[in-house]
Image (tube, rainbow, N blue to C red):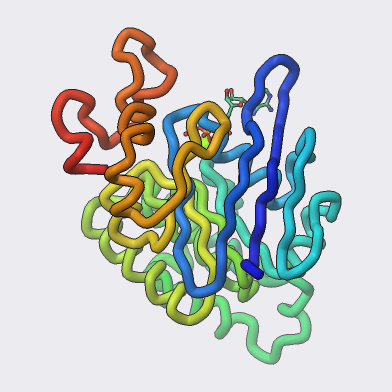
Amino acid sequence: MPLLEVNDVVVRFGGVTAVNQAGFTADERRITGLIGPNGAGKTTCFNVITGLQRPTSGSVRFAGRNVTRTAVHRRAKRGMARTFQRLEAFGSLSVRDNVRVALDISGGLGGLMRNPRAKVDQVLERVGIGEYADERADAIPTGTARLLELARCLVGDPTLLLLDEPSSGLDETETDAFGELLIALAAEGKAILMVEHDMDLVMTVCDDIHVLDFGEIICSGSPAAVRADERVQAAYLGSSDTPGTQHDLAPIDATTTIPAVL
Ligand SMILES: Nc1ncnc2c1ncn2[C@@H]1O[C@H](COP(=O)(O)OP(=O)(O)OP(=O)(O)O)[C@@H](O)[C@H]1O
Ligand SMILES: [Mg+2]
């Protein structure tokens, strides 16, 4: 049984169906991509998985249990950790203290641990931002802040990492290093579910990809299978006279590069 199972989830906001009968899984030792055009319902799926959004119908199973109605902090204690599309660090705290707070929240282990600072510094080194440990979080570059978000997740030793657009704000070199870090984390046993607009990154690191379009999963499979799928290409190309709906996926040049990039 996969670590995470999303079954037939529907989320309606008034008249808007943000997620429609979506079903997908994520599992240990795998990097799973959840992709789709702007507004497709990706973040709403993350909110349902983590408990910030109650689904209209459908269920979420995590580590063998139905957690559809389980509180956010209980899901976190069972091993879920997420990053947010909008950065959520405490600006006036140092980078180190931001991670320390996350450690304390994740089960109160910080109080019991003999050397919580060593644990925090080890995680900062792991994600490659050790040199920023004493900087205020509101004074660091966006790319570094993304890595700080990841460090805040990792410090609680989660089994499932949910990353919402983790590479936005990273430059090309940072993105390459980030991809390698994800692969290493998966090799150590973590399940990673990632919403990401950088198709090069998605196609390089993901083992499985699920594609959402207008709230529905239109394709699931390997990067090669997804790249070749006509519905996926159509969803990303969309209709060029409908701005702001389907086709404004950042890295895709709608005129020429779809087959190459996807
Ligand atoms: N709290 C809410 N109330 C009403 N509508 C919402 C709410 N949250 C999301 N929506 C709508 O649900 C749809 C899906 O939004 P969601 O944020 O999940 O998309 P997304 O795939 O994460 O998009 P993006 O790539 O732009 O981050 C959109 O039409 C959005 O406007
Ligand atoms: Mg989103």
Q: Residue furthest top?
A: 241
Residue 212 shown left or right of residue 59 in the figure: left
- Residue nearest the viewer, comparing 101 with 55: 55
Q: Give above or below for 29 relative to 259.
A: below
- The total of numbered circles placed on residues is 0
State the residue at coordinates (74%, 40%): 53
Residue 31's quadrant in the figure? bottom left
**Which image quarter holds the N terminus?**
bottom right
State the residue at coordinates (78%, 54%): 72
- Residue nearest the viewer, comparing 252 with 95: 252
Q: Give above or below for 127 relative to 113.
A: above
Q: Position of residue 147 (x, y in %)?
A: 44, 60
- Residue nearest the viewer, comparing 66 with 101: 66
Residue 101 shown left or right of residue 211 in the figure: right
Q: Give above or below for 62 relative to 235.
A: below
Q: Residue furthest bottom?
A: 114
Q: Position of residue 237 (x, y in %)?
A: 30, 25
State the residue at coordinates (22%, 25%): 254
**Which image quarter holds the C terminus?**
top left
Residue 256's quadrant in the figure? top left
Q: Position of residue 100 (x, y in %)?
A: 63, 70
- Residue nearest the viewer, comparing 108 with 98: 108
State the residue at coordinates (84%, 55%): 70
Q: Residue furthest left?
A: 256
Q: Position of residue 71 (x, y in %)?
A: 83, 53
